[in-house]
Image: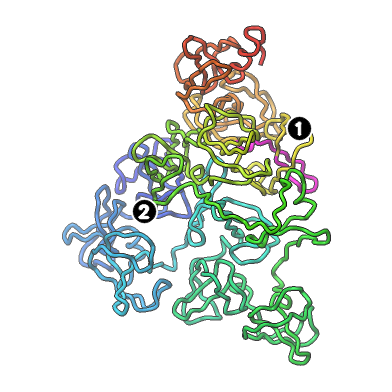
Amino acid sequence: MESEGVSLPWIHKHLMMPWNHLGKGNCCGRIEAITDGYFCEKCNYFVHKKCGDETSEYIEHPSHTGHTLQLQSDTYHHCDLCGTTNENLFYRCEICDFNMDLFCAKYPPPEVIEASETHHHKLTLLKQRIMFDCGAKCGKRRYGYPYKCDECDLAFHVDCVWHPIEVKHPIEYITMEAGERVSLPWIHRHFMLPWNDLRKGDCCGRCEAITDGYYCKRCGFFVHKKCGEEAPESIQHPSHSLHPLWLQITPNNTSCDLCGKTIVDLSYRCKICDFDIDLCCVKYQPPEFTDNSEMHDHKLTFFKNRSKFNCDANCGKAGEKEFHYKCDECNLAFHVDCVWHPPEVEHSSEVDWTCGGYSCKRCPGYIVHSKCATRGDVWNGKELEGVPEEIEDIEPYVVIDENTINHFSHKEHNLRLQVNGVQFEENKRCSACIHPIGLQSFYGCINCDFVLHQNCAECPKKKWHVVHNEQLTLATREGNYFVCNACGKISSGFVYKDGKRKLDVRCSSVSEPYVHTSHPLHPLYYIPPNRKEICNGCNLKESHVLRCIEDGCEFVLGFKCATLPQVVKHRVNDHPLLLCYGEEEVSGKYWCDICEKESDPRVWFYTCKDNHACLHTKCVLGDLAGLMPSNTIIFWGRSCEVVLNNCVTRPVCRKCKSRCIYPNILKELGTSDTYCSYLCLKLHMMYGERERDH
């Protein structure tokens, strides 16, 4: 059945294929946590499995009791329950001209909301489609039914005030070429990367023994995995039973009403009562009394009185205006953290300050031993005592609206975000990294063919990197090509540079701690080489490597393998090829279908969907993947055009005399000479016809 397709005639006219998609469905217009569904390649039409399997062609609904409603599609409509206009699936009564979208069929918005997270007065649903500015300051302006507050004369979108409790927000995983990106929209507005960090989380302001989490490179925002996955959008809490509490990014100088501490970033809030709780107190509320503290022998009473005090635990931290525990017998005061340790909480190890260290004023959780901080590869030798820190403009683009930006590399036109994830886009190439767009979301120019991967567009104009102790500046061009100092690949894309040091954008995205999907249990770190080391990916010696520092783990990964694309397309197979991290136990011989030579399955290779292929990474990519097709490079005074090797008959290389097998090749202008690789061109320039073996 799966090979022939699935028939859902009441939803779509064509046969559909079982599919997995991370975007919004054309059924309900929403993102689901379970991404299985059905897809029509002919129409680019995706339906969630849940919507496809649970949706009936005819229904009876309490909002329209007079007649039966029939499922319909392929036409614009506006929902008579929420007023939103869309072209997703909907139920319709032809007799009464009544429409209802799939989401409202399951979760109809109430006529009246007594109190919501967005507004503390009663809100009434106005069944009149109007254009209005939303009082929730969401930035969206559209026609629809508003919820209105008669006391304040404010209007709100239905989505901004009505949140069905049964609806859970999915954690949206999107597979990118650099790994997985995660969407936690109720916590942070940007995509985040799976991360491993020892510092305090911007979620709860504490260190966790389990350091996995999610990190936004653009904002420097780190969330513990535990907080990200276990923090729902709204809760009922025994400390404030009157109203639900809603998760929010906390304004500055807001303190927790349970422990009195200043909240770092995330908290739960009741806007009606102006009541706030930090994430730690939601789970571990400090008790009113404690008589079994390791800190003091007597009973301690929790005082919800913000006053300055000297902590008698001799912890060294000043007692600012915050709640504290007090011993009435001894007249002693203690910080909440010095006394109250929830038994379930594991504490992560602290840095040993015996030999001194450095900390960041902006990022309190970032600390470095003095010996490590003054290493030659880390410190550039500049003394900054008394020198004010300059705040530089490193933003690469100006936001025009929710989906449109103006990027500094293409100021003449605006770029619009296009969400991908279903079809592999191999004909468009990112101008920054030069690789095909593939399955990634991207920004495309409104007026021309210029495109950038979404993550490439977010590369800052200046950054620090582990392989260099000076700041690097992003440039859109570096001659007609350059060689990346980290991976040794050539590129004609964007370059981070300082003097002679040059990094391509893919290598520049590697930061510490670096988590690669081939080694997910431990983070990797860059330690300057004193000799070349064997890379676990290709089994070759590399100068710049990332290393696992866990005891007994000798995993080493070169930058060349660390930045290999996870998914690629090649003419040898109709399906996208996936990067495989080698197989330990193998028997028999494996062959590469491209070069028709034996391949070693113990090193990394590309394979197809049915896992029958074992293709060399070099054969799939070649050494010209970083050069834009149709561009011209000049090497030792000779001009060569980068050409796609997509003809039926493959040309013969001038140097190695073999048929060109790589996807990109070089054609010398003014001659009929063709070179299968940059290496062949280089050897021909150096040795002519004498040296053929490469």
Q: Name which residue type carries label 2.
A: Gly
Tell whether 274 sits left or right of 684.
left
Q: Name which residue type carries label 1.
A: Lys
Q: Residue at x 58, y 24 (%)?
A: 619
Tell whether 489 sits left or right of 140.
right
Q: Verify whether residue 517 appears in magenta.
A: no
Q: Is residue 446 above or below residue 68?
A: above
Task: Tell us which disc is closer to us: 2 or 1.
Answer: 1
Q: Which residue is mark 2?
A: 29
- Colour theme: rainbow
586 or 117: nearer the eye?
117
Q: Position of residue 499 (x, y in %)?
A: 63, 36
**Around disc 2, counting alpha carbons within 10 Å, would you say few (fewer than 14), some (14 to 19), or many (20 or more)?**
some
Q: Is residue 420 visible?
A: yes
Residue reaching furthest right? 354
Q: Verify whether residue 553 appears in magenta.
A: yes
Q: Residue at x 56, y 27 (%)?
A: 621
| Dot 1: element | loop
265 or 358: nearer the eye?
358
Q: Which residue is mark 1?
A: 532
Q: Residue at x 73, y 58 (%)?
A: 358
The mark nearer the N terminus, 2 or 1, is 2
| Dot 2: element | loop
The alpha-carbon separation of the residues under discs 2 and 1 comes to 52 Å
Q: Is residue 541 above or below residue 345?
A: above
Q: Position of residue 683 (x, y in %)?
A: 63, 15
- Magenta range: 546-563
Q: Is residue 560 visible?
A: no
